[in-house]
Image (cartoon, grey):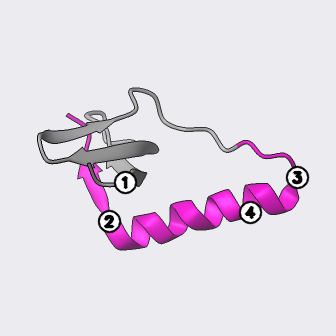
Amino acid sequence: MSSWHYQLMRHKDGSLAVHEYYPSDGGVGWTKEPIGIIGDDVEDVKASIQMILDDIDKHGVKNYE
């Protein structure tokens, strides 16, 4: 199984949200609910936001089905 990443997903109503995305050989899966950003300090939150931005640049937008 490949490692998970953050994925920007377009919902049926047209809204966009970030989910954890789990690709695998047998298909894919993602979190039912969008993720929240929580950290122990400012630097932790900033690091999470940067990882999300990097993954959006790398993986683009997928439709939530």
Residue at 14% over, 41% down: 27
Which label lies toward us, 1 or 3? Answer: 1
Tell me, yes or no, if residue 40 can be seen here: yes
Residue matched to label 1: 3
Which label lies toward us, 4 or 1? Answer: 1
Q: What's the amino acid at mark 1?
A: Ser
Residue at 29% over, 54% down: 2
The residue furthest left is 26
Give x and y (percent) for residue 22.
32, 44
Q: Earlier in the sequence, mark 2 or mark 4?
A: 4
The residue furthest front is 1
Task: Measure the C-alpha gap from mark 1 to mark 2.
Answer: 13 Å
Q: Secondary structure at mark 1?
A: loop
The disc placed on residue 44 is none
Residue stretch rendered in magenta on the structure: 38-65
Q: Secondary structure at mark 2?
A: helix
Residue matched to label 3: 41
